[in-house]
Amino acid sequence: MPRTDRPLVVTGAIAACTAAGTGLVVLTMLALVGWIAAPHAGLGLTGVLRTAALLWLIGHHVGFSLPRTGDIGMLPLGLVLLPGALLWRAGRWVVRTGGVGKLRHVGYAALALAVPYAMVSAALALASSSAMARPSLPEAVACPFLLALTAGGLGGARALAPWSELIGLLPDRLRAVTAGAAGALTVLVAAGGLLAAISLALHLAEYRAVDQSLAPGAVGAILLLLAQAAYVPNAVTWAISFMLGPGFAFGTGTVIAPTGSVLGPLPAFPMLAALPPGVRPAVPAAASVAVLLVPYLAGAFGGLLTTRAAPLLALETAPLWGFASGALTGGVLGILAAVAGGPLGDGRLAAVGPSGWQAGVVAALEVGVAAAVTAGVANWLRLRKVTGERPAPGRAVADDDGHTIYVDPWADAADQGPARPPSSPGPSSLP
């Protein structure tokens, strides 16, 4: 893509409008299909466009309020993938065509994209507001801005350098902690997805009963399936919170945890058939133990990756870096748990989903402790192997004839002259 002489702010505004417009067109087509398949009296073409704009805002995790119902914040995380992918491409385009040649300048490109994108979002929030639904204006500014800044910044950075070079810019310790947290999160997400799938498979009859009671028709069935697919990330996050122990709620005074569940009536949504209402005892002891062990296994895997990605650590510092990877994992899970739930009105369903701070704290402790122990043991084995192959500096050793030899720890430094501090890579080392 050839570079232009346009100012960076103009390039960012063009990319922001293009990304927002593309996503809005896709959602408008879906809204039109639903309107044609199941028309409602009093909802004309203007109402369809407002619905599409509201769906666009929901895709950026912008809550809204309904009259006589209250605030709606339980939003599908899967819809974030569409604007995230568009903003990723927009960030790459801004960097390539906006004359950005240094990695340290990518932040300016991301900001040039995020600011006009937030302005477009605010305009859509005002335009889609009606007596039927009113989006939250503060969230309509903050959430799209953060998403554009993150996705656009990552896309712009990737346009300048491959991932291997970008990861190489991180300090050794931070790179090791990030690798450990990524490994632990991978295990938890995989286990959470498996647990959610098993729970839904065990209640397949209830799922079919709810689906048949809705009688959505052919087109409605496709739209209903897309809506359920958009809630899959929420379900995985809820399953992870279940494995951590605190569980999650679906209404005030309810809980779903390995120790037992207490639920009231559920909305007619097929995926919720995996959560049978009423008072249920705890899962079988063997299954409960297996579920609760998953976070510790994830922490052990993360601690192992932390040790392998880090240089040789001192014996007493390796557990600290392992626990740091667990703390980072807990922070990420806390954020995911907070955005995976939300209110479904001001009544009984005002509390839906896991508690963000509970999931984050428990995950940091469980994953962190397991990662600290594993990192300490793995690093001790590495130290033992190294000291077994090479005499420690300044240690006395004996040769085959019984003579004692003292190793000079500074011999290599004296032969090579004064030591020079190693040059650490930084953003300036990239184009």
Image (cartoon, rainbow, N blue to C red):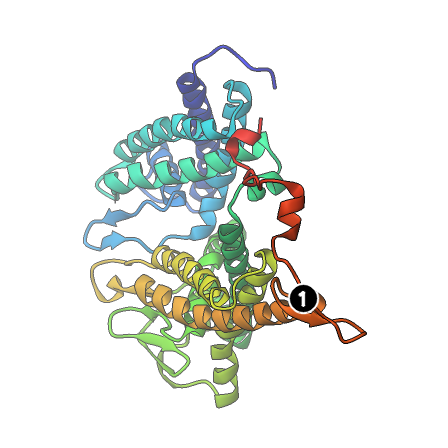
Q: Which residue is at a point 36% across and 64% down the rendered structure image?
A: 360
- Position of 158 with respect to 138 (left or right) is right
Q: Pick the quarter of the image with the C terminus.
A: top right
Tell me if residue 226 comes above or below residue 111 in the rendering: below
Tell me if residue 12 comes above or below residue 412 in the rendering: above
| Closer to us: 226 or 192 | 192
Give the secondary structure at mark 1.
loop
Q: Name the amino acid, label 1.
A: Pro
| Closer to us: 50 or 254 | 254
Q: Residue furthest right?
A: 401
Residue 164 occupies quadrant: top right
Residue 56 occupies quadrant: top left
Residue 110, position as x, y percentages in the image: 43, 30
Q: Which residue is at a point 28% across and 68% down the rendered structure image?
A: 251
Q: Which residue is at a point 60% across and 41% down the rendered structure image?
A: 163
Q: Pick the quarter of the image with the N terminus.
A: top right
Residue 405, position as x, y percentages in the image: 70, 67
Residue 86, position as x, y percentages in the image: 50, 35
| Closer to us: 70 or 394 | 394
- Position of 94 with respect to 42 (left or right) is right
Q: Residue furthest top?
A: 5
Q: Which residue is mark 1?
A: 391
Q: Residue furthest front?
A: 403
**Residue 42 visible to the viewer:** no
Count of residue discs: 1
Tell me if residue 204 comes above or below residue 161 in the rendering: below
Task: Using a 10 Å C-alpha cutoff, classify the residue at mark 1 as few (fewer than 14 neighbours), some (14 to 19) or many (20 or more).
Answer: few
**Residue 391 visible to the viewer:** yes
| Closer to us: 217 or 305 | 305
